[in-house]
Image (spheres, rainbow, N blue to C red):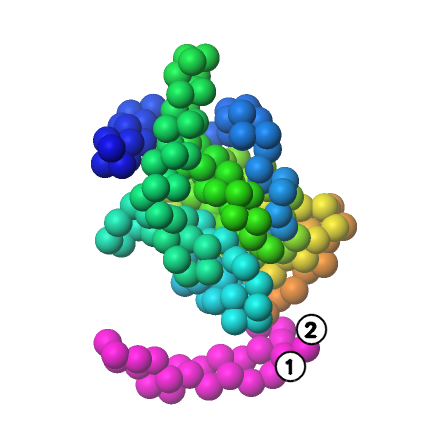
Amino acid sequence: MIQENIKFIENLKRFGIKEGLNQIRTLCSIFNNPQNQFPSIHITGTNGKGSTCNLIANILKESGYKVGLYTSPYVINFNERIQVNGIDISNYDLENLITNLRKKTESINYDVTFFEFITAIAFQYFAEQHVDIAVIEVGLGGDLDATNIIESIVSVITNIELDHCEYLGKTRLEISKRKAGIIKQKQVCITAEKDEYIKEIISKEAISKKSRMIFINDYLTCETIKENFDYQLISMGGLYNF
């Protein structure tokens, strides 16, 4: 049954990408807005989003928090997308959540995309698990991504390169405006971006939201000493207390 339900979700890709937050808001309202039931950290960028999410989630877990983690895509099995304290959502829980939301959307003939559907499920699972905090990876861009209905306490922007130009813009500056759209009111925004023009765009968005801006490279230095397929040795320096 679980494979049938996963196949159902995968088939939702036929609806393509629908930018905008109205559909995901309606979808989550079916679950009584679970995204508002836990604090979250939101991560966007071009490269390194997934590894940054996993690093943050593991740091929080080792600090004693119960941590939800939502990333994409998966490597081996579908359940990897949704985790709590490093453990994939079980087939039992995933099947129940899919079945429940599927029945409700079909009863009102509500068409949603693959990413909207699985995002709503992730939020509901984290709410049911009573996580202390959730680490959420953006699917595409930032401002109009389905994950952007969360009111995160921290936004992280890893770096910005050309990606998904057909949806986000044809230049890095255009794309940076879209990704900076995850910054929320009076929160903290952290970025490792080095390009001065992009940093200015991110800063302006943070200022408009009255949010604190932290540029990692102003505080920390990182140098690769040695790397191969087995490991990477780095040297870090600088201030660790912001």
Q: Which residues are magenta?
A: 217-242
Q: Is residue 223 left or right of residue 34?
A: left
Amino acid type at circle 1 is: Leu
Q: Is residue 35 left or right of residue 19?
A: right
- As drawn, the residue found furthest toward the front would be 92
Amino acid type at circle 2 is: Phe
x then y, percent, for residue 63: 57, 71
Reading the image, the residue beneath label 2 is 242
Q: Residue at x 35, y 48 (%)?
A: 90
Please tell me whether residue 83 is drawn above or below residue 143 in the rendered image.
below
Reading the image, the residue beneath label 1 is 239
Indicate the quadrant where residue 93 lies. Answer: top left
Q: Please indicate, yes or no, whether residue 121 appears anywhere in the rendered image.
A: yes
Q: Residue at x 72, y 58 (%)?
A: 212
Q: Quadrant of the N terminus?
A: top left
The answer to whether residue 63 is magenta is: no
x then y, percent, for residue 14: 29, 25
Q: Please indicate, yes or no, whether residue 45 appears anywhere in the rendered image.
A: no
Please tell me whether residue 28 is drawn above or below residue 71 in the rendered image.
above
Q: What separation in Å lies between label 1 and label 2 (alpha carbons)?
A: 7 Å
Q: Is residue 190 left or right of residue 120?
A: right
The answer to whether residue 238 is magenta is: yes
Which type of secondary structure does the marked residue at label 2 adopt? loop
x then y, percent, for residue 165: 39, 40
Give the camera-side residue of 221 and 136.
136
